Amino acid sequence: MESPLYDTDLTPNEQRRLATLALDVSGALIKPQPLTTILQECAEALVRHLDAAFARIWTLDETGALLELQASAGCYTHLDGPHSKIAVGQFKIGLIAQERLPHLTNDVLHDPRVSDPAWAEREGMVAFAGYPLLVGEHLVGVVALFTRHPLTEMMRQALAFIANNLALGIDHKRAEEKLRVRNEVVETLNHLGQLLSAELDLQKLVQAVTDAATHLIGAQFGAFFYNVVNKQGESYTLYTLSGVPHAAFAHYPLPRNTDLFGPTFRGEGVIRLADVKKSPRYGNNAPYHGMPADHLPVASYLAVPVIARSGAVLGGLFFGHAQANVFTERHEQLVVGLAAQAAIAMDNAQIYQQAQSAVEQREQFLTVASHELKTPLTTIKGYIDLLLRRAARTGNVPESTLHSYQVLEREVGRLTRLMDMLLDLSRLHAGRLHLEQEPVDLAGLAHRVVTTLQPTLPKHELALEGADQVLLVYGDALRLEQVLQNLAGNAIKYSPEGGRIGISFERTSDRVQMAVSDQGVGIAPADIPHLFEEFYRGDERVTRGIAGLGIGLTVVQHLVEAHGGKIRVTSEVGKGSVFTVELPCLAG
């Protein structure tokens, strides 16, 4: 059972302060901004809501041995100095990281972990609190603050809660950044892969390379020996053959680190021999001292290492012919080129598999993180509802306080919707977003949405057109309402001065068109092709100050297409936008 955000023993004022702090930190952690910017905002929120002298946040570096200062707010805002980099186990911050336990004191002057009590006395510091930032057993950083007043129970609860959220947020951001870098690599390689090879199956890929090279250079047979690593981390060698059946080599051992084969497997360069039997490399190793008696006759020999961009030797291409002097310099160049293509394609296949695994991890993380963030939001909402009911019952709550409750209620609702969209995005990527389809009247649905939204919009007028008839489609009513809610919400959000929001319908013989229009800021032509991309926010000069993550339209497009429809947009900067959804309709 989840523990509540705070004890009911806290005063109403403490409850409000804690709820507001939690909202500010949760809101910062889901912003699509750099980690340092997010952590600085969180540190400022700690100082502001807990009346701290200063607050700081460190993150653990990749070595796991050093804490790096990322944010500092209050009377100290610099990020340099002796505490900018702290070894794990050093000073009180390093000890918190090492022990993975919080350290709190209301007697800074006599705390043995405070290294400079004279400074503390001079600055009037009374209390200190530091918490490790842990995701399970995994340490990601430390958060700490000093105050000029004793720590209260509310502050202890707040810091414990915020430390948990900070840890999840840092872990999420780091995973997101790793995925971004990895995806950039995958996208680049996929582009090259389309030019070099469309095959992602390693066995098929190397077989195709072996066949092509054998044919191009006129070899009687070719072989590609390559190393693979299984899920258990065990390395082993596979091979493909061309020009001869597998049975021709089935009873021979794999090539060994001999004078002839070794240089290729070590990546030392190309070996091209006019007659392998006349080479000093030939015949020096037991047990055969050359080729077995029943081996296919080989005179001309060509071997090319296949080397990854990292420098790792992936394997080698080997070719033979019974006649001498068959392989020319041109043949060598052809195979070297094919070996480079093979290396790129093999890297591509391997990274593709890793990327698929990374995407699965990302979706799992999004699901877990969204649920983790929704749990405290649900708790906060419960307490806000309690405060609002209490205010309504007593009738003696100041107007400003009641307004604050209402602002908090709206912000919790906004954050909850953002979490829902993140979960939807995760389900879409994983193919787990299922539709409960039935006949749905779009006109009736639109009337319900307008009836719900209009009372909350003092500056906007929602105008329905063409909704005086039954407009049946086959779909998921909740998801179709989500589409309309999102489009209408965007129209309202991007019309900050108010005005008319049009929701119009037009029916043809087999389609229904639903258009949502506004008279707002509009969309730059360069932004329109990217509107439905994940996390795309458009021109900052237009979107600055307008909240959002850039995922709503992505979800809308997926939902519309899942219903067999399509969505398009027309817009003019300064004059507004029109989003048109087209869906197949039912007779009726």
Image (cartoon, grey):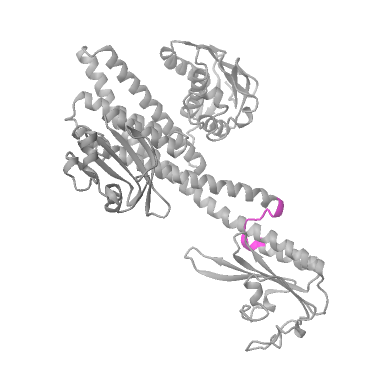
Image quarter of residue 56: top left
Q: Is residue 485 magenta?
A: no
Q: Position of residue 175 (x, y in %)?
A: 45, 46
Give the x, y percent position of residue 168: 37, 42
In front: 446, or 496? 496
**Would you say residue 433 is visible in this rendering?**
no
The percent position of residue 146, horizontal first and vertical second, equals 26, 37
Residue 283 visible in the current orientation: yes
- Is 286 positioned to the left or the right of 13 in the image? right
* Above or below, 173 relative to 487: below
Q: Quadrant of residue 145?
A: top left
Q: Nearer the viewer, residue 5 or 155?
A: 155
Residue nearer the viewer, 144 or 328:
144
**Total tally of numbered discs in the picture:** 0
Residue at x-position 30% and y-position 52%: 90
Whole-percent x, y for residue 419 in the image = 41, 33
Residue 525 versus residue 100 in the image, above or below: above
Task: Left or right? Give the position of 336 relative to 82.
Answer: right
Highlighted magenta segment, given as a residue range: 195-205
Which residue occupies the foreground of this view, 158 or 215? 158
**Left or right relative to 369: residue 559:** right
